[in-house]
Image (cartoon, rainbow, N blue to C red):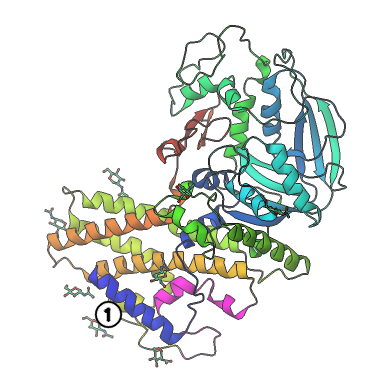
Amino acid sequence: MLVLTLHLAWCAAQISLVGTTATSKLDNLTAPFIFNSLSGLITQWSNTVHGTGHSIVPGILHPFTLLYHAREDDLLLPPSPEWLAWDPEMSYAIMVPRGGQTHLFTYRTTRPANVIYFDGMSAAWGAGWLDSQHMFIYGMSKNGTKDMNWWDDYGRAEKLCEWAKSRDVEGFVRMNAGFEIVWCDFQSPTLQLVSHLNITPPGTPERDSAPRSSHRKLVDFEEVELLPFDASFQDSFDDPEGRPPRRGPGDGDGPRRGPGRGGPGWRPRISDLALTGTLEWVRAASHRSFTPQPHLTLSYADMVTYYHPRLTSLVADRIGGPMSSHRLSNISAQDALSIVEEVDEALARSAAGDRGSGFDWGSAARGIVEYWGDRVSHMHAYLVNASNPDSNATASLPAIRTLAYTLLNPYMQPGLMPNASGWDLFFGLPSTVVPSSFAFSANITALERCMYQATSFLSQLRTTPQESLLQNSIESVLSRLCNEFGVIFAQSFNLTEADSDTVHRSFIQQWTRSVEHLMQWLDWTVWLRCENVCPLDYVCSTPVWPVAWFSRWDDDAESLRPRCMRMAV
Ligand SMILES: *[C@@H]1O[C@H](CO)[C@@H](O)[C@H](O)[C@H]1NC(C)=O
Ligand SMILES: *[C@@H]1O[C@H](CO)[C@@H](O)[C@H](O)[C@H]1NC(C)=O
Ligand SMILES: *[C@@H]1O[C@H](CO)[C@@H](O)[C@H](O)[C@H]1NC(C)=O
Ligand SMILES: *[C@@H]1O[C@H](CO)[C@@H](O)[C@H](O)[C@H]1NC(C)=O
Ligand SMILES: *[C@@H]1O[C@H](CO)[C@@H](O)[C@H](O)[C@H]1NC(C)=O
Ligand SMILES: *[C@@H]1O[C@H](CO)[C@@H](O)[C@H](O)[C@H]1NC(C)=O
Ligand SMILES: *[C@@H]1O[C@H](CO)[C@@H](O)[C@H](O)[C@H]1NC(C)=O
Ligand SMILES: *[C@@H]1O[C@H](CO)[C@@H](O)[C@H](O)[C@H]1NC(C)=O
């Protein structure tokens, strides 16, 4: 550890000497959170597991995108605002299980439309998930209140749409099981009605509840429990044997049984044909686990986030907690207002034609996760095995050295430095510098290349303030990855079979701890997966709200683990 500290200090000195980048002086405490928000935008798993969204990202909904809206009445023009789903499965599963008539509207967009995306589980009801919308509304209203109801979907939509009106924004993209849009004006020429169909499945019973308001209700909490498939869902986890699902009335009293189900007066509300509708919603959401929602181009250069270090009122509540515990409700009025102003500035700048550097921040962040993610977890798994007292520590060394080397080899010049130590190869300057007229500086360390190669050029470009924050987050994440793997490489490269097994073992223990801390700090969802390959009639999914959300109030890591869910037809 002493060696590590010395080398980090030494490297810091080098960086300032060569003056390569050291781009921002921004506080980097929220860098891993901003990085996760960025790399996970419009994907299901990251936003489910990290939960409470902090970022607000303007974007363009593509022309000719199909969108869906289901309702019980047969109005030809839905009132505004209302909801559009990207997946017809979502519209179906929200309306059909209620019984009665269901009408499905299919729309096509006719032109690009400006939208604003709230990341996280922003279309779900629960502690923290709506914070960013609520604090945005709080910030934009004079004398606003922080007390807003989760279930007041229409009140929230009306306030957001009121704000959007003068800003040429047509809707708000949000996520629960898949993505949806709060659409502000159904009379907008952006929407073209493609079809309006009565899709009520044959054999659907009459709606048996009291008349509902004409307003959309998502799924009530009771209904989550009442959804006809929750019993089969319970049975379908990690159950490749495929026990037959329990289904239908009177089939026992599971602990999660909601009020009324199976009790007096209970009767099924849907047609047999529609029984899999809810499961199909989960299947649709599973298509977006890591693949960003198509037909939407986010404007990364305008990405505003409540993780900005200037929002000091939020710092205390975050200390020590994972991203899913980060709340915004203690934000100061001033900080809340500053986010609204920042979004306005970004929208105005972009409308004036300034789109920032043009750097593709989303691909850059996802590329880093792709390059490092599975190799870091491979290294971790290998180190855990090698730490076992029964394993031969000396025999483990070459593999550890190779795994570290593989990640760092694009940056080092062993061909130029025969017999150099691992330290010199990665942390030291090359003894001979390629004299050249190349645009890049050859006189920098491999460590600096590893940390800054992807982004340092941006210092010479015109970037937006939002891009500077993203650059800081990417460089902070790479800085930690490159330094820690650099140390493992240098130390393992220096060790030989001549050193004792005890020495090797103590290094292995030290590396295991450092990779473990690194993984905790990064908190990447790419490390989540189903334990087994799921059979063909299963999908691998994290719990998704509201259809398959078991943990409900308690969002610990174990309950959010992805599992094979049976699509029990
Ligand atoms: C490379 O950088 C080091 C440290 O900044 C400096 O001492 C050295 O003179 C430089 N070499 C060349 C060839 O520029
Ligand atoms: C805000 O509230 C204060 C005190 O309740 C009141 O005096 C003031 O007029 C209000 N301002 C606006 C813009 O509503
Ligand atoms: C808000 O601050 C209060 C007072 O410090 C604290 O008790 C509470 O836990 C905080 N709320 C959240 C959501 O962190
Ligand atoms: C760790 O050991 C287990 C059991 O021997 C083995 O199946 C697994 O492949 C090993 N993992 C790595 C990364 O070496
Ligand atoms: C451990 O592995 C090394 C290198 O492969 C070998 O030389 C040594 O004999 C092994 N030790 C034991 C106790 O098997
Ligand atoms: C590298 O080490 C080998 C073996 O010790 C030696 O023969 C060779 O001369 C060294 N090369 C350089 C450039 O120092
Ligand atoms: C964060 O900044 C501090 C202070 O500048 C620095 O010591 C630390 O190495 C940085 N951490 C990362 C991961 O970049
Ligand atoms: C490299 O290993 C030798 C022992 O083989 C040790 O004396 C030396 O301190 C190590 N160097 C570094 C930089 O870790």
Residue 434, how many percent across, how many down?
A: 45, 88
Residue 442 picture location, percent across and down: 46, 84
| Residue 445 part of the magenta segment | yes
What residue is drawn where x is 54% and y is 57%? 366
In this picture, is 208 found above or below 319? above
Residue 81: x and y in percent read 78, 40
For the point 75% across and 65% down, which residue is it? 348
| Position of residue 8 measured from the top left corner of the image (x, y, whole percent) | 33, 74
The crowd level at tag 1 (other Cα within 10 Å; few <14, some 14-19, many 20+) is: few
Instruction: Judge whether residue 2 can be spotted in this image.
Output: yes
Question: Hey, which quadrant is residue 532 in on the image?
Answer: top left
CB of mark 1 near ligand 6 (< 8 Å): yes
* Left or right: 493 as drawn, with respect to 239: left
Label 1 is placed on what type of residue?
Answer: Asn
* Res. 415 visible in picture: no
Q: Quadrant of residue 478?
A: bottom left
Q: Of helix, strand and loop, which one carries label 1?
A: loop
Task: Return the residue nearer the eye: 558 or 377.
Answer: 558
Residue placed under numbered mark 1 in the picture: 419
Task: For the N terminus, give its image quadrant.
Answer: bottom left
Q: Is residue 110 above or below residue 397?
A: above
Camera-nearest residue between 443 and 107: 107
Q: Quadrant of the C terminus?
A: top right
Q: Which residues are magenta?
A: 435-461
Q: Is residue 240 above or below residue 480?
A: above
Q: Nearer the viewer, residue 268 or 383?
A: 268
417 with respect to 43 (left or right) = left
Magenta stretch contains residue 397: no
Label tally: 1
